[in-house]
Image (cartoon, rainbow, N blue to C red):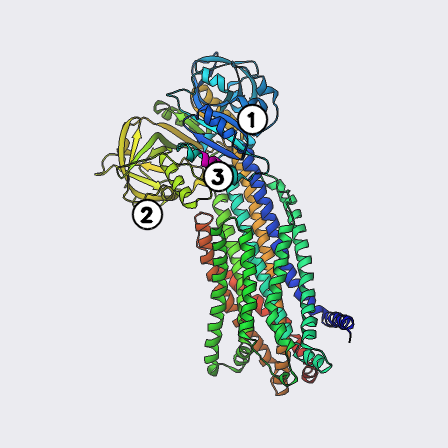
Amino acid sequence: MTPSQRVRWRLLMVGRELAAQAGRHAFHALCLAIGLAAYAGTLEFSGRVTRAVDTQTRSFLGTDLELSSTTRLTADHVQALRDQPEVGRLLQVEHTVTMARTVDAAQSRLVEVEAMGPDYASWTLEQGRVRPRPAETWATLGRAELVAEASLAAAWKLEPGDAVVLAGHELTMVATFDPAEVELTVGGNPMRLGPKVYVQLDTAEQLGLTGRGTRFQSRLLMDAAEGTPTAQARASVAAYLAAHHLTGPRLRTFRETATTLSTPLRNLGFFLEQISFGVLALALLGAATSLIAYLRSQSAAAYVLRCLGATPTDLMMIFGGVVGAVCLAGTVVGVGVGQAVAGVLATALSQFQPIPLVDAGPAWPIWIGGLAALIVVGLICVPSLAELSRRQGTELDQRARVTSRRRQLASWGVAVIVVVGLVLWRAPSLGLAAYVLGGFAAALGLLWGGATLFLGGLARRMDGMSPAWKIGVAQLLAQRGLTALLMATIGCAVFLLVSVLFVRNDLVAPLRTELPQNRPTTYLLGIADHERAPLEALLIEQTGREPDVAPMIQARLIAIDGVAIQSSPAVAERDDQDLARANRERSRSRFHRLTYRQNLQPNERIVAGEFWPPDPTGAAATDVMQASMEARFAERMGVGLGNRLSFDIQGVPVEVTITSLREVDWIAGRPNFFTILHPGSVLGAPARHVMAINAGDAPARQALQAAVVERFPSVTVIDAHAVIERMSSMMDGIVQVTTLMAALVLAASLTVLGASILATRVRKTRDFAVLRTLGAQRRLLVRAWFAEFFILGATASAAAAVVAVFGGRLLVQQVFELPTTTPVLMPVLVTAAAILACIAVGTLGSAPVLARRPSDQLRDA
């Protein structure tokens, strides 16, 4: 034959083989397609979630970078930062607090003041977002004018044109501003939700709000230059700060200012993306397993073709073409369907989310993943293709043949390198990539190794088994390598399903248990000692509930174990060690809000040390100089049990020893603090109080706010109901997404299981035909099926469930930094369901073996 004739003949043989076993090849393609659809869908959806979170977070900050400090940078430094080539637009904002009141009011209340720099003439605030475009309101705002937040204007019954006394000076309110859509999400911290007024920076300077002796925070909001990545702009600004020894300012990107709403969404996106790689690995295992079994079953066809004059290259091309066509069809269909499903899902769930999820982003990264999957399956099948192409006539009756170990290791090694490269390319950092690769490698290694050891143990104990169990075990031992791969594949399916359910519960359950019935909806700030009792009585009278009350003391940490605290450095983002040290120093040098009490709250538990015993007087203990610190905050600060902390409280030094570490459920919304002091250590210290209460429905909350404003004008009232509603709707969306993810994993798992059963069907047909010819009864063979598939499902599922529980626990604790539960019923139910599914699918898939006469089966085999 000429080369062109040989090519046409090979293509003809590929088409005939695909048509002759169309159902089997369609199932192979379906196995890969479902796995790739789940992979593409989850990856696309997680990308939408991540982009939406970035958009929402950046909308709150308004710019890419924030440089904050308790001292103002000089004009020269501000101009130098503005001239950095990596920095685009720069806006100067000063944040401070002062007393304000209406003209006819007798008492003042504490309000927050945002003073905008001169650049604000070209900026505007629109629905809580900073927009770089001209704004008539700010451009024409005079020195005696201000803009009031809507909640403050409503509480004081202010209209545009009314006068407000701010820091002893009378200003005119010219507009109101409602930042609820974004501002209420800031850090979940009610201390930053207070009513604000907005003035020009020169107005604040004229009123003396930003001079020496005042408590203010200076912020520079910077955009990265067009085409410049945010990380590069951050590194440039950090390098300037370090070069000029500006150690006080704190530099953050918009991602580092993650809000309470964006953090669980970002966790969800990261979790879905990592699960997508697991589903992809599961699809690859299932497709490769079934295709390897298919290639091994084509010994007779290969021998016939060799007898007809086909060369080893012809066999490689023919069967390689079949494998390639199946994989290509599965890849194209799977990735296309996955992207479409992700788009429909995002559109459908956008109504439940606090931020839109409809931004699709580029499609090429997902198709690269599909191409990588195609390459990996091909590499895994190469050793079996090579074995088939070298088959000789004398090798026709050999039932098991081991391929060249060296060739197999080389081919599979390249496949592993492709998978590792894919994960490294998609992972946001090397650390997270190591978690993903290490976790899946450990899970697969444990499952594969455990399956191999288990099969070896079965082989040594066959003598004492019943005939049915002997036949079932013999079927598993006939091709140990393939059986171990099947067990690992089924185990990976159970591992992914249990992991999804486990992490889903830990991500969602802690939030939903407090929403919305038990969580406080109203916060009251700035309560003086003499106002606490009458205000508490008013809240009980208005709501019928007792509020959560916590005293608050402003303090500065001055030393740890006698070593003075240094100012926090500013470092480049790329230097992980320096960045960790900088974060530790910032945690130490920040102003600390402390509280003191005698008991733990219901949403707290001690994880190390001992909390001081209850004492009604707060002073009877022998050692009152104790502190309890939140565990993760203590870790960030680099302190632990036994460390001595020296605080400056209103000029009075107070030294306490850390005697316990706590775990706090912050989502509960109670007034919690990082550091709790023993009441006896701060007797007589000046303090303000914070209260939190569930005030009921909207009319009740409005009535409560009006009553508090009328009787306690200096107390700030925050209605956080909007936060709770948005978090509740967001949690509903997360439940739907993770439930759908579990369904996709389950579908992929069942398909892989079916492909695995199909992979052994040809060998099972031949072996059972021989047994029936020798007189084996149908009942015996059915029992043998049961034994085979029970062992296959039970060992893989049980081992995978145990690995998934511990792996999921590690993921939630180390990556998501959330408290975990220890599920018992859920893994047991999943394991039992997997065993039943193995038996059911295996029995249904093998039933046709008994439907034909043994002579016909042996002839076809």
Res 678 visible:
no
Q: Earlier in the sequence, mark 2 or mark 3?
A: 3
Q: Nearer the viewer, residue 708 or 527?
A: 527
Amino acid type at circle 1 is Asp
What residue is at 48 percent from the left and 55 percent from the top? Answer: 434
Q: Name the side, left or right, on which 266 lies relative to 390.
A: left
Which amino acid lies under the numbered mark 3 shown in the image of this protein?
Ala
The correct choice, above or below, for 737 with respect to 26 in the image is: above
Q: Which residue is mark 2?
A: 608
Is 315 on the left or on the right of 699, as rendered?
right
* Mark 2 nearby-residue class (10 Å; few <14, some 14–19, many ≥20): some
Of 790 and 8, the residue lying toward us: 8
Pair 2/3: label in front:
3
User: Which tag, 3 or 1, sits closer to the chain's start?
Assistant: 1
Number of numbered callouts drawn: 3
Q: Which residue is mark 1?
A: 178
Report the predominant secondary structure element of the magenta stretch.
Answer: helix
The percent position of residue 680, horizontal first and vertical second, equals 26, 33
Q: Is residue 498 magenta?
A: no
| Image quadrant in which the N terminus is located | bottom right
Q: Say whether marks 2 and 3 touch (CB < 8 Å).
A: no
Residues drawn in magenta: 234-240
**Gap in Å between the C-alphas at discs 1 and 2?**
44 Å
Which of 585 and 796 lies nearest the eye of the viewer?
585
Q: Position of residue 328 (x, y in %)?
A: 68, 61
The residue type indicated by label 2 comes to Ala
Q: Which residue is mark 3?
A: 235
Distance from disc 3 to disc 1, alpha carbons, whole Å, reads 34 Å
